Structure formats: C-alpha cells, structure tokens
Image: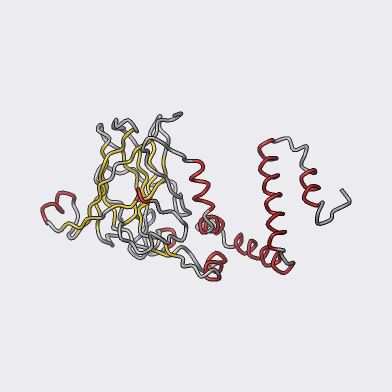
C-alpha cells in the first residue's frame, strides 16, 4: 500500500475496499473509483482545476435548504437524473413514460373533488385536463390518485414566491368508477430553473440556457400498479428540444387547445378563453 504511484494508486484504493461487508456498496464504489481515476488520467486534471471542483461542490451544498436543492439541479442539468430514471423505468406494453421528479414537489397537497381547480390566486389562463387512468390491458383503474403541481403564470412554484398562497397550484384527484379524472389548472409557461447559484454559473460557462419547456407535473399511483412520475408538455413550446434538464419525451407532448364558448366554460366553471387537454395515463401492474 506504500507504493502510491500514478500507476498503482487506483488498485490500492480498490484493494482497501476488498472487505466491504455490503456487496452492492462495494460494486458501486469500485466502479466509481475506477471511472473517476480514469477520468482524471484522461483529462490530466490539474491541481488548480481539482481545487475549483471542490469549491464548486462546496458552494453547491451551501445553496441547499428546505426550499432549494442545488444538488438535484446539478443532477438534472447533467442528464444524470433522467438517465437514472430511464434505467429504473424500462416499462413495456405502452405504459405512460416517466420523467424527472424535480426539486419542487411538496407533500401534503389537498385532495380535491373531480373537476376542482388547483389555482388559489386566480391568475393565469385556465386549462381543463381530463382523461382516464388505465391498466396496460385497457381496463380502467378506479380510485387511482393523481398528485398534480405546476408553476404560476410567472414561472415560479409557490415555495419560490412569497406572493403566492401556500400550496398554490397543487392538488390531488381520484379517478371515478370508470377511471376518469378531471381537474382545472392553468396553462403552464416556460421557466428558468434557479440559475443564481453554482449550477447557473456552470450553465453559463457551458453556453447553455436555464429554461424548461412549459409543463404540468403529475404523480399517478394506484394499488397494485407501478406508480409513474411524469409531465404533460405544451406542444409548440420553444424549449422542447433544448430542455435544460433533458426531461422531454415525445409521448408526453400534447395539444393545449383553446376554447372560447361561454356555455362550455360555464360547464367547467372557468372563464374564457380557456384551454383543454385530454390525456390517458397507462399504468403497469405491479410485479409485471
């Protein structure tokens, strides 16, 4: 172990973990050390560059609190979050595709009746979202839970914006006996992820923008089925092909169709103009 030369140090570190009692931890750490050391050799990392990297990670940690998770943003903008999601959600049989969870979910949203609005401040253009939650065999799933959240018209989630009511634009909805759901939100807008910290500095250094295409977040779950965390993206959004966190998937891009009929608006208890989206979510049975 005393011969810690450039050629020998990687093997010495691997040897030091030979007796690790957790086999999964040993496998992960062996691979991490091997790839990290290979990366350092490949780019011939300087001491100054390594010091900058340590400082960057330190500042990333210092930006984290109960309302902001800078490390999740770092994972998102490097594509790591989506890659981990893809590996862990290799679904078949036409199940709804997943995408990133994001750092702005909050526990404790209120369960609301069918067709209720999640907007507490009345801002934004109303959107009626309807459809069914189905099994991959086409069977409706009654009692499925849709947990929904989105930004306000200013592109901020409520915990980012002290002017928004608590839990604004968040809500939970149950499907009926035919698996149908309906709720009212607002037409989502494109927005920038927080870029006033080290992650934003990295994006600018790389010549990248911080914007995400407009979307609504949904977490859909039901007893006996694999839950899915997903988005509904607005067709035609200018950032669909350059999402800062690589979260877009073609199957999740939908038409937000404008409606202007007063009678139809009254049926949904919204103002005109409003938008309507119809989308069916497909869940895989658990254990399949």
For the point 30% across and 55% down, the residue is 119
Direction right: furthest residue: 2
Q: Is residue 115 left or right of residue 244?
A: left
Residue ranking furthest to the left: 263
Q: Which residue lies at the image location 38% right of the left edge and 53% below the top edge?
A: 167
Nearer-the-camera pick, 266 or 233: 233
**Is the image coloured rainbow, by chain, by secondary structure, or in one colour?**
secondary structure
Which quadrant of the figure contains the C terminus?
top left
Residue at the image point whose x is 65% and y is 62% from the top: 58
Q: Position of residue 241 (x, y in %)?
A: 40, 60
Q: Residue 218: x and y, percent?
A: 37, 47
Residue nearer the viewer, 233 or 164: 233
Residue 259 picture location, percent across and down: 17, 56
Position of residue 180 in the picture relative to residue 93 (left or right): left
**Above or below, 229 relative to 62:** above
> Residue 174, relative to residue 59: is it above or below?
above
Q: Which of the 4 image quadrants contains residue 124?
A: bottom left
Percent position of residue 273, x then y:
18, 60
Q: How many marks?
A: 0
Q: Residue at x 77, y 39 (%)?
A: 18
């Amino acid at each position: 172990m005393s011969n810690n030369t450039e050629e020998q140090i990687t093997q010495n570190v691997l040897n030091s973990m030979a007796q690790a009692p957790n086999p999964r931890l040993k496998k992960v750490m062996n691979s991490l050390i091997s790839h990290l050391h290979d990366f350092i050799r490949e780019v011939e990392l300087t001491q100054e560059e390594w010091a900058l990297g340590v400082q960057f990670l330190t500042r990333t940690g210092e930006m984290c609190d109960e309302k902001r998770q800078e490390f999740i943003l770092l994972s998102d903008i490097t594509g790591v979050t989506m890659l981990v999601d893809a590996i862990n959600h290799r679904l078949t049989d036409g199940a709804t595709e997943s995408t990133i969870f994001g750092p702005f979910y909050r526990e404790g949203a209120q369960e609301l009746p069918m067709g209720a609005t999640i907007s507490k401040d009345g801002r934004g253009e109303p959107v009626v979202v309807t459809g069914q939650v189905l099994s991959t065999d086409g069977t409706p799933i009654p009692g499925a839970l849709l947990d929904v959240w989105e930004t306000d018209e200013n592109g901020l989630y409520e915990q980012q914006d002290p002017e928004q009511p608590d839990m604004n634009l968040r809500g939970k909805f149950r499907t009926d006996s035919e698996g149908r759901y309906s709720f009212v939100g607002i037409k989502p807008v494109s927005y920038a992820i927080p870029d006033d910290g080290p992650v934003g500095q990295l994006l600018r250094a790389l010549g990248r923008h911080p914007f995400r295409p407009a979307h609504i977040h949904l977490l859909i779950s039901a007893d006996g089925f694999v839950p899915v965390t997903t988005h509904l993206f607005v067709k035609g959004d200018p950032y669909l092909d350059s999402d800062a966190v690589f979260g877009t998937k073609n199957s999740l891009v939908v038409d937000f169709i404008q409606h202007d009929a007063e009678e139809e608006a009254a049926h949904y208890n919204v103002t005109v103009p409003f938008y309507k989206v119809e989308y069916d979510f497909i869940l895989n049975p658990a254990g399949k």
